Image (cartoon, rainbow, N blue to C red):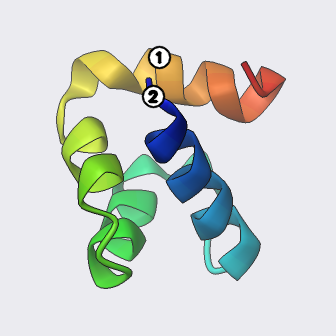
C-alpha cells in the first residue's frame, strides 16, 4: 500500500459517509471521488487484509 492509497483512505474517512470496514461502500465512494488508486486497490480481495490493518493500526 503506497502513500497515495493511504491518503485516499483518510480522505474517504473524513467524509463520514460510511463505516470504514464496509469495504464495498468505501470502494464506491472512492470511485465517486475519482480515487482510482484506492478503487483499484480495493477491487482485489487480496488487499483487504492490508486495508483493514491500516484502518485498525494506521500502519
Residue at point 59% right, 51% down? Answer: 7
Name which quarter of the figure residue 45 lies in: top left
Residue at point 47% right, 16% down? Answer: 49
- Residue topped by disc 1: 49
Q: Which mark is residue 7?
A: none
Q: Is residue 23 visible?
A: yes
The one of 28 and 38 positioned closer to us in this rendering: 38
Residue 14 percent across, percent down from the top left: 74, 72
Name the residue at the front extreme.
3
Query: Is residue 21 depicted above or below 27 in this figure?
Result: above
Residue 1 percent across, percent down from the top left: 44, 23
Query: Is residue 21 depicted above or below 15 in this figure?
Result: above
Name the residue at the right extreme.
57
Residue at point 69% right, 63% down? Answer: 13
Query: Is residue 33 depicted above or below 30 in this figure?
Result: below
Residue 25 percent across, percent down from the top left: 41, 65
Residues at discs 1 and 2 in contact (Cβ within 8 Å): no
Name which quarter of the figure residue 55 lies in: top right
Q: Which mark is residue 2?
A: 2
Residue at point 67% right, 56% down? Answer: 10
Q: Is residue 58 left or right of residue 19?
A: right
Q: Is residue 21 left or right of residue 55?
A: left
Query: Is residue 8 depicted above or below 21 in this figure?
Result: below
Q: Is residue 2 left or right of residue 57?
A: left
Label 1: few (<14), some or many (≥20) within 10 Å? few
**How much space separates mark 1 and mark 2, taking CA atoms?**
15 Å
Secondary structure, mark 1, is helix
Secondary structure, mark 2, is loop
Name which quarter of the figure residue 59 lies in: top right
The one of 30 and 23 positioned closer to us in this rendering: 30
Label 2: few (<14), some or many (≥20) within 10 Å? few
Q: Is residue 16 visible?
A: no
Amino acid at each position: 500500500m503506497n502513500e497515495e492509497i493511504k491518503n485516499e483512505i483518510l480522505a474517504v474517512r473524513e467524509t463520514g459517509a460510511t463505516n470504514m470496514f464496509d469495504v464495498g461502500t468505501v470502494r464506491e465512494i472512492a470511485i465517486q471521488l475519482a480515487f482510482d488508486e484506492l478503487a483499484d486497490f480495493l477491487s482485489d480481495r487480496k488487499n483487504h487484509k492490508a486495508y483493514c490493518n491500516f484502518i485498525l493500526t494506521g500502519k
